[in-house]
Each structure stands twice: as structure tokens, then as C-alpha cells.
Image: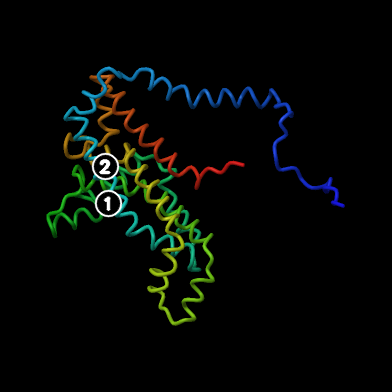
């Protein structure tokens, strides 16, 4: 004889016959239209007939190549500094940790143009560090390709740090403790135990970081300028094309949209859960 199901058990599945309240359905549908219609408009206005020729235009290829290179270098820079910082925030108790975490997330809410101004005040020729770099090494960072990389890393690093810190907090620390009891040092434990445990989180954070760097505009145009072939990335090329050639701007926007959709599709199982 089988036991009767517990009537008090919570129901977690949606009821097929349950009616959706109109007060929720209408604004939900309007919100969906608000998000989808601009993308549909972009696809509808895309010059499909001349798309292959426009995609192979020298200006498009140059901006795309520069964008991919700078975003990749910015991601590597973020990995070099962001992974240790995320480990510090997740594994070490120290005074002011909440303040440090808040400072790390500031670029997420800071207007990118303000970030570009802040970078100029630090790395410009008369900046806090820029004056020393220029005098000692003759190194000028603003309005150069290196400046693009720095601007993109500044706005994209928080995405990497947050993703990796979350992965570290979700990882089972018993493996690290077991390695320590077996005589492994902290560096060996980190490289041979911790990193393999959080590898999916690191990969997801790096992809998000790369995508954010690829789409960076405000800090880049403020700190690095808009020079074709040197600092003009895809978002800047879109901004410039809007003034002279709408179809070119649409094609460039379509490329960025395609990359964004591909990133979200690749990370769907990790960042978007569904019953």
C-alpha cells in the first residue's frame, strides 16, 4: 500500500490550468516588447543585400580586429590581477574587506565617461602616475592602443572578480584543507586544487569580461580618443558611422549584437536557470 502524498507539501511546479493575472500579464508583455522591439528594428533595417560587401569593408575589418585584440588583452590583464583579488576577497578575512569589495564594484555603477576622466587624471601626462611614466620612461598612455586596453580593463574587471569570487565561495574548501594537511603550500594548493575547482567560474567570468570590454565606449573615447586604426573600436566606429552612413552603423551594430547573443547562449546554462 503506497502512502498518500503529503497535502501540506509545497507545490513547486506551475499549474497548467492556472490563469495568469491580467495585472501582471500586460506589463510583462509590454516589458518584453520594450526589450525586443529595438533588436527587431535593427534586424529589419539591416541591409542584407549588401551585407557581405559591408562586412569586408576595410574600415569594418580594422575596427573589428582592433576590438578583438584590445578586448583579449584587457581580459588577460583582468585575469592577471582579478583572480588574485577575487581569491583575497573570498578566502581572506582582513579589516576593510567590505570597503575593498565596494571599491571593486564601483566601475559597475560609475558612468564610463567618468571612468575615462579618472583614468586621464591618473595616467595622463599631468596625472598622478602619468607624469612619472612620461618623465622616466617617455611612456604616454592616453590616446593610444594601450590606453584602449586600460580603459576596457577598468570597466570590465569587476565582472570577472564577481564571477570568480562567487565560484570560490561555492567551491568546497575541504579539498584545499586536505591539500594543506598533506603538506602542500598555499601556492601549490591554489594552482593545483583551487584553480581546477573554479575553472568553470573563471572561464565564465573571462567571457563576460571579454564581452564587456568589446562593447566599451564611454571610457575608451574619453581616455583613448577615436583614431581609426589605433583607438577606434567597434562601438566608436558605430558612433562615427551614425553621422555619415546609417547602413554601416547598422552592420557594425549587428556584429556586436551577434557577439552578445553568442555569449549569452554559451553561458545560458550557468547564468540562467529554468525549471
Task: Tell me which residue sits at (23%, 46%) in the image.
Answer: 147
Q: Which residue is mark 1?
A: 122
Asked which secondary structure carries label 1, the reply is helix
Task: Tell me which residue sits at (71%, 31%) in the image.
Answer: 16
Disc on res. 68: 2
In x, y percent, where is residue 204? 42, 50
Question: Which residue is situated farthest in the front direction here?
Answer: 1
Q: Answer with the quarter of the image where residue 31 lies.
A: top right
Residue toward you, 205 or 56:
56
Task: Tell me which residue sits at (35%, 36%) in the image.
Answer: 259
Asked which secondary structure carries label 2, the reply is helix
Residue toward you, 226 or 234:
234
Which comes sooner in the sequence, label 1 or label 2? 2
In x, y percent, where is residue 154? 34, 49
Question: Which residue is situated farthest in the left direction here?
Answer: 138
Task: Tell me which residue sits at (35%, 17%) in the image.
Answer: 45
Residue toward you, 156 or 254:
254
Amino acid at each position: 500500500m503506497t502512502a498518500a502524498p503529503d497535502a501540506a507539501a509545497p507545490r513547486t511546479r506551475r499549474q497548467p490550468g492556472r490563469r495568469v493575472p491580467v495585472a501582471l500579464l500586460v506589463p510583462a508583455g509590454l516589458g518584453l516588447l520594450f526589450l525586443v522591439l529595438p533588436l527587431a528594428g535593427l534586424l529589419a533595417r539591416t541591409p542584407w543585400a549588401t551585407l557581405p560587401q559591408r562586412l569586408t569593408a576595410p574600415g569594418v575589418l580594422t575596427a573589428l580586429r582592433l576590438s578583438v585584440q584590445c578586448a583579449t588583452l584587457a581580459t588577460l590583464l583582468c585575469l592577471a590581477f582579478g583572480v588574485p583579488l577575487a581569491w583575497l576577497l573570498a578566502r581572506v578575512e582582513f579589516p576593510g574587506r567590505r570597503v575593498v569589495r565596494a571599491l571593486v564594484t564601483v566601475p559597475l555603477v560609475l558612468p564610463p565617461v567618468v571612468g575615462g576622466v579618472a583614468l586621464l587624471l591618473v595616467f595622463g601626462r599631468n596625472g598622478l602616475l602619468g607624469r612619472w611614466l612620461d618623465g622616466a620612461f617617455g611612456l604616454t598612455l592616453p590616446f593610444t592602443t594601450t590606453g584602449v586596453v586600460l580603459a576596457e580593463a577598468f570597466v570590465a574587471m569587476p565582472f570577472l572578480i564577481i564571477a570568480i569570487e562567487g565560484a570560490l565561495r561555492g567551491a568546497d574548501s575541504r579539498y584545499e584543507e586536505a591539500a594543506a594537511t598533506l603538506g602542500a603550500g598555499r601556492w601549490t594548493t591554489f594552482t593545483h586544487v583551487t584553480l581546477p575547482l573554479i575553472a568553470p567560474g573563471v572561464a565564465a567570468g573571462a567571457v563576460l569580461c571579454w564581452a564587456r570590454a568589446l562593447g566599451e565606449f564611454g571610457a575608451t573615447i574619453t581616455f583613448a580618443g577615436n583614431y581609426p586604426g589605433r583607438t577606434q573600436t567597434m562601438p566608436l566606429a558605430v558612433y562615427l558611422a551614425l553621422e555619415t552612413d546609417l547602413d554601416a552603423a547598422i552592420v557594425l551594430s549587428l556584429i556586436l549584437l551577434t557577439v552578445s547573443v553568442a555569449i549569452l547562449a554559451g553561458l545560458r546554462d550557468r547564468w540562467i536557470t529554468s525549471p
